[in-house]
C-alpha cells in the first residue's frame, strides 16, 4: 500500500490536504478536512507546519494498515 499527502489549491488561496492511497491496484482519495493558510505571518507558518505534521502522522498510521 502506498500513501501520499496531496494538496488541492482553493480559489481563496488556502490549500486543503487529502491522502492519495494506492492499494491492490486501486486508487482512493481520503479528504482529511485539514486546510493550510496563506503564509503571511509567523503564526500562519507555525499553523501550517503543525497541520502538515498532523497530516504526516495520519498518513503514517494509514500506511501501517
Image (tube, helix red, strand yellow):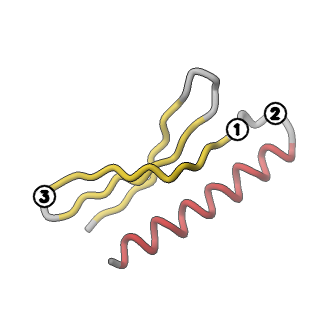
Residue bearing the label numbered 1: 37
Q: Position of residue 8 (x, y in %)?
A: 48, 35
Q: Is 17 situated above or below 12?
A: below
Q: Are marks 2 and 1 in contact (CB under 8 Å)?
A: yes
Residue 49, labelled with which disc?
none
Residue 25, labelled with which disc?
3
Residue positioned most to the left: 25
Q: Are marks 3 and 1 in contact (CB under 8 Å)?
A: no
Crowding around mark 1 (Cα neighbors within 10 Å: few <14, some 14 to 19, many 20+) is some
Q: Is 10 situated above or below 60?
A: above
Disc 2 to disc 1, C-alpha distance: 8 Å
Disc 2 to disc 3, C-alpha distance: 40 Å
Q: Position of residue 17 (x, y in %)?
A: 51, 46
The residue that appears at 30% across and 63% down in the rendered structure is 2
Crowding around mark 2 (Cα neighbors within 10 Å: few <14, some 14 to 19, many 20+) is few
Whichever of labels 3 and 1 marks the residue nearer the N terminus, that label is 3
What secondary structure is marked by label 3? loop
Residue positioned most to the right: 42
Q: Position of residue 47 (x, y in %)?
A: 76, 51
What secondary structure is marked by label 2? loop
Q: Position of residue 39 (x, y in %)?
A: 75, 37
The residue that appears at 86% across and 38% down in the rendered structure is 41
Residue bearing the label numbered 2: 40
Residue positioned most to the top: 11
Image quarter hosting the N terminus: bottom left
Q: Answer with left or right where residue 21 lies relative to residue 32.
A: left
Amino acid at each position: 500500500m502506498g500513501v501520499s499527502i496531496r494538496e488541492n489549491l482553493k480559489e481563496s488561496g488556502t490549500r486543503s490536504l487529502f491522502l492519495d492511497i494506492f492499494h491492490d491496484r486501486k486508487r482512493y482519495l481520503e479528504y482529511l478536512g485539514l486546510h493550510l493558510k496563506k503564509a503571511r505571518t509567523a503564526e500562519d507558518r507555525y499553523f501550517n507546519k503543525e497541520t502538515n505534521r498532523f497530516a504526516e502522522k495520519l498518513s503514517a498510521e494509514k500506511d501501517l494498515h
